[in-house]
Image (cartoon, rainbow, N blue to C red):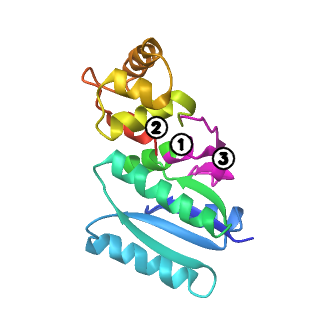
Amino acid sequence: MVKTLISTLNEGSSISVAAHKLAIDKLVILVSSPISSSIQQQIDKLKNKYDGVLELTIFPTSSLSLKKVVEDVVNIIDAENRVKHQIILHISLVNIPQSLGIIYAAYVRPESIEGLYAVLEDSGEIILLPLLNLRLEGPKRSLMLELKNGERSAKKIANKLRVNQSMIYAHLKDLQKKGLINKSGELTDNGYIAVL
């Protein structure tokens, strides 16, 4: 089975350490878009280092939108799952927005990955990070999807989901308390991530 490592680009050795210690076959690197000349130099170094050794894919993503990074990583995870690859996630302690995106993607797809790792630059120690499950399931997920699609009527949602209206109101209150929707029933960025 092909082992795919999804990581962020950094100037240190953590990608090399993770690739070696986790014995990967494919490396997917998230990079900030647009790609600067310094990032392109780092990409070229990786291409030279791993040419003929492993498959390397560069994936341009946002450096500013956590929601976009999470969505991109979830899409990569889903694509790798479809071809039955084993998926490992790696965060660098340098590229914080993209690393947070990888962490949140792990939290909404914990069943799809083998592990979430960080490498300590000074010692080369690889650390397995805990996986939480932030993915909503059941009626709350169905409710969130209705809200995502623009429906705001509790009565219509209750009828569509075949539950009573009081349950919808209780779920709305809970979702708002958790920061997944705002007072007008719109999904927050965290709410959007929870239903990916």
Question: Dot 2: few (<14), some (14–19), or many (≥20) neighbours within 10 Å?
Answer: many
Ranked by sequence position, the earlier of labels 1 and 2 is: 1
| Residue 86 placement, left or right of 109 | right
Q: Which residues are magenta?
A: 105-134
- Which quadrant of the view contains residue 128? top right
Q: Which residue is mark 3?
A: 111
| Residue 110 placement, left or right of 7 | right
Residue 50: image x %, image y %?
57, 80
Q: Which residue is mark 2?
A: 194
Residue 11: image x %, image y %?
43, 63
Callout 1 touching callout 2 (CB < 8 Å): yes
Q: Secondary structure at mark 3?
A: helix
Give the CA separation, mark 1 to mark 2.
Answer: 6 Å
| Residue 193 placement, left or right of 40 | right
| Residue 108 disc label | 1
Regarding residue 131, the answer to whether it shows in the image is yes
Give the CA separation, mark 3 to mark 2.
Answer: 14 Å
Q: Is residue 59 magenta?
A: no
Question: Dot 1: few (<14), some (14–19), or many (≥20) neighbours within 10 Å?
Answer: many
